[in-house]
Image (cartoon, rainbow, N blue to C red):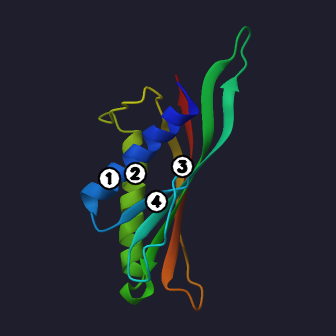
């Protein structure tokens, strides 16, 4: 297993759920080039950060990853906060699906999501989008 596989497992769950539930929402990951889709588009910016890469039991190192997932839901202000909350619920559903018994891990990293926080809505004067943040911690191992 690798950091790439652990990240890909989480990314795929988010991408698949959002595509199935709300195909008009774009998903952008922090490890890919990105151009802002504009003032009227809905999108989710996903950042995956690692805190730990191994466990050191007696003997050799064991691959065990932990970190955090931060999803910033961007919804046009002219749609109201309801659009933001709807998309945030899709993000929460995607994260919860990773722990489901029906989740298929094609990257062999066995990810698990812990408590999910949010959506915490941020509305800054003069910006075109509401921002709702959904976050959680995760673990993965090989």
| Dot 3 crowding, Cα within 10 Å, few <14, some 14–19, many 20+ | few
Select label 1 or label 4 by which is in front: 4
Q: Are marks 3 and 2 in contact (CB under 8 Å)?
A: no
Who comes first in sequence, dot 1 or dot 3? Answer: 1
Q: Name the residue rendered at 42%, 30% in the picture.
A: 107
Q: Is residue 18 left or right of residue 126?
A: left
Question: Marks 1 and 4, Cα distance to the nearest angstrom?
Answer: 14 Å
| Dot 4 crowding, Cα within 10 Å, few <14, some 14–19, many 20+ | many
Select label 2 or label 4 by which is in front: 4
| Disc 2: which residue | 14
Select label 3 or label 2 by which is in front: 2
In the drawing, what numbered circle is on residue 17? 1
Q: Nearer the viewer, residue 85 or 7?
A: 7
Residue 139 percent coordinates (x, y):
56, 36
| Disc 4: which residue | 28
Q: Quadrant of residue 44?
A: bottom left
Question: Marks 2 and 1, Cα distance to the nearest angstrom?
Answer: 5 Å
For the image, the number of numbered tags is: 4
Residue 11 percent coordinates (x, y):
44, 46
Q: Are marks 2 and 1 in contact (CB under 8 Å)?
A: yes
Q: Quadrant of residue 83?
A: bottom left
Q: Name the residue rendered at 29%, 35% in the picture.
A: 102
């Amino acid at each position: 297993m690798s950091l790439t596989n652990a990240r890909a497992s989480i990314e795929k769950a988010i991408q698949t759920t959002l595509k199935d539930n709300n195909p008009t929402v774009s998903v952008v990951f922090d490890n890919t080039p990105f151009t802002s889709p504009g003032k009227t588009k809905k999108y989710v910016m996903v950042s995956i950060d690692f805190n730990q890469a191994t466990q050191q039991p007696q003997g050799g190192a064991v691959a065990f990853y932990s970190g955090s997932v931060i999803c910033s839901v961007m919804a046009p202000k002219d749609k109201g906060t309801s659009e933001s909350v709807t998309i945030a619920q899709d993000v929460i559903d995607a994260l919860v699906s990773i722990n489901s018994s029906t989740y298929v891990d094609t990257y062999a990293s066995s990810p698990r999501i812990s408590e999910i926080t949010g959506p915490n809505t941020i509305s800054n004067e003069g910006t075109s989008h509401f921002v709702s943040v959904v976050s959680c911690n995760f673990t993965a191992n090989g």
